[in-house]
Amino acid sequence: MLQQTGVSRVTPKFEQFLQRFPTIHALADASLAEVLPIWSGLGYNRRAQYLLEAAQKLADVAEPWLYENLVSLKGISHNTAAAIIVYSYDRPMIFVETNIRTVMIYHFFRNHTAVRDTDILDKLALVVPWNNQNKSQLHSPRQFYYAMMDYGTYLKSTHGNVSKQSKGYVKQSVFLGSRRQIRGQVIAKLVNGPMQIRDLQSSLNDPRLFGVLDSLEREKMVTIQGTFVMLYNKTHKT
């Protein structure tokens, strides 16, 4: 939920989500049509689809989950998989996200441009306490990354977004009037139930609608039956 979405927006949705799906099995047994109404408002609805698919694949996998279990899932990169292992099991792994990237660029690459994540990871491996001095002491990877996240947030508020010096930095595309906005509007309307395509067309009044519906159907986000369109409702049981 926190990927590309602020904490203030995520917190109430996270609480609602856990009330509706308190366990991974409760989520795995749901359909996308049950998940999206609760997710609605966070944007990037494909993340909800990926989360549901991940729950369905991991529900019967014994914990602790392995890195290989996680990185094979849609929407989970090395960094996300490593972060899950660190925060869930307090195990040492090296990963980068925006706040950690901010800290590393500020201290080690301040006068550089197009800084690669591979260079940041190499430098981070020299910084983490479990690879450093006093190895006999107990170190909590989770606590280390908590501190890095907080420090990164502080640096952003005092020195700006130095992550712009990252090679992978991409400025957020304009949402208003975009195809992404049309996708979000379609999902938001279907949260209330199936609609006649003509009613959806009349409501949105955008020539890109049919192309958007076609892509959403291919992605199994919606189902089109005759003149009706609805949220995809198949569960992994059927």
Image (cartoon, rainbow, N blue to C red):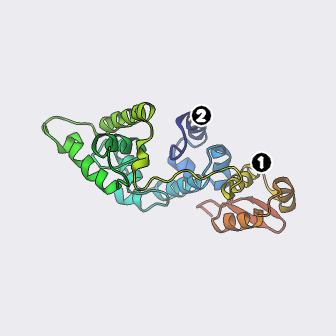
Answer yes or no: is residue 88 visible: no
Residue 128 location in percent, x, y?
Answer: 24, 42
- For the C terminus, which image quadrant? bottom right
Answer yes or no: is residue 163 visible: yes
Say which residue appears at 40% left-offset and 47% top-offset.
97
Q: Residues within 10 Å of mark 2 (few under 14, many from 20)?
A: few
Amino acid bearing label 1:
Asn
Q: Which mark is residue 122?
A: none
95 vs 74, nearest the viewer: 95
Say which residue appears at 53% left-offset and 51% top-offset.
171
The image quarter in which residue 236 lies: bottom right
Q: Which mark is residue 192?
A: 1
- Is residue 33 found left or right of 84 in the rendered image? right
According to the picture, the residue beneath numbered tag 2 turns out to be 12
- Is residue 197 found left or right of 123 in the rendered image? right
Residue 63 location in percent, x, y?
Answer: 37, 50
Residue 225 location in percent, x, y?
Answer: 79, 67
31 vs 136, nearest the viewer: 136
| Label 1: which secondary element | loop
